Image (cartoon, grey):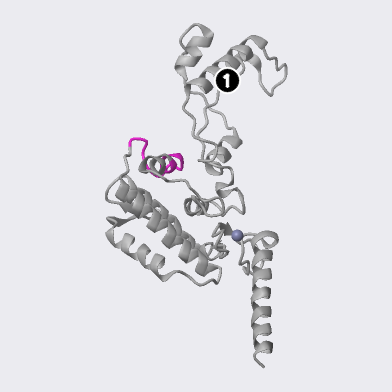
Amino acid sequence: MTQSMGASWGIQPLLERVGGTIPIVGYLQTIMGVDSINIGWALPDCNAHAPDEHLHLFPRHRSAGSFLLVHSMTPRPSASRYPAWTSAVDPAPGDLRIVQAFVNTLDVQDDEELWPTPEDLTSWLVAWDLVDREAQLTDTDREDAIRFREGLRQLLLTNAGHDVDAGAAGDLEVVLETLPLRCSLSQDGDYRLVGDREGWPGAAARILTLVTRAMSDGTWARLKACRRDTCLWVYYDTSKNRSGKWCSMSGCGNVMKARAYRERRQIRDAAAGSR
Ligand SMILES: [Zn+2]
């Protein structure tokens, strides 16, 4: 950023701390999982949003130049790696959406695994602020993270009243047994689980903290996984009576209803034929 500002202005920038809130930046991080850099497009004396607001064109052109330079210098993740749909569909409230996004890193419908390598897992966890940028995760961490994720998915299928895969649910317990975790209690009456090591155990501890908190505040029961075998998407059930069983009634709901109808008819026809 400093390099590109220097290149477009012909002088190195002076770094100073100033404040300001731009709400969309928070949404870009929490919903899309992308980091943001804001570039000033005006001078401090322009009186932005105040009487006599006046904007010079000169810094705008320079800032646009800086933006293009940063854009060309920054390695970008592929569009599919941090897709907008990670948690934008029926997002869970608060930090529970981190758990939702975590489980939705496997897109069964499009057969896309967002963590094909340990580096991909690391980038994803860094983007969601679950590990430090310096973290280096291993193949074993990736295998554990996937077993952990699929185990959570089984709990979320149970929340929707569906049958679960006992093997995957058992795998979750195995991963939990191997995690070096402890519980930390703070003076304000809160608790959090802490991984004894940074990296994957630390990330798992943070996710487990969010899961257990949601279990205590009642939001967990509304986080559910769709049972359609080509979907398995995690959604937040906002229905009044918490009865939602599918990620969408018009999509998977209709397909599964039609499938159940066909199966009932086959049984009925078979019974009629055997008479
Ligand atoms: Zn679905």
Q: Percent x, y for residue 169?
A: 40, 67
Q: Is the magenta stretch mostly helix, strand or loop?
A: loop
User: Can you name the residue that lies furthest to the right here?
Assistant: 52
Q: Which is more toward the observer, 153 or 37?
A: 153
Say if residue 189 shows up in the picture. Answer: no
Q: Percent x, y for residue 205?
A: 36, 53
Span shown in magenta: 124-134
Say if 153 sits above or below 258 in the image: above
Q: How many labels does the image show?
A: 1
Q: Percent x, y for residue 143?
A: 35, 53
Q: Which is more toward the observer, 39 or 34?
A: 34
Say if 34 sits above or below 259 in the image: above
Residue 126 counted in the magenta span: yes
Neighbours of disc 1 within 10 Å: few (<14), some (14-19), many (20+): few
User: Can you name the residue that lies furthest to the top here?
Assistant: 10
Q: Is mark 1 within 8 Å of ligand 1?
A: no
Say if 26 sits above or below 216 in the image: above
Task: Please name the residue shown 48% across and 11% down the image.
Answer: 6
Name the quadrant of the C terminus. Answer: bottom right
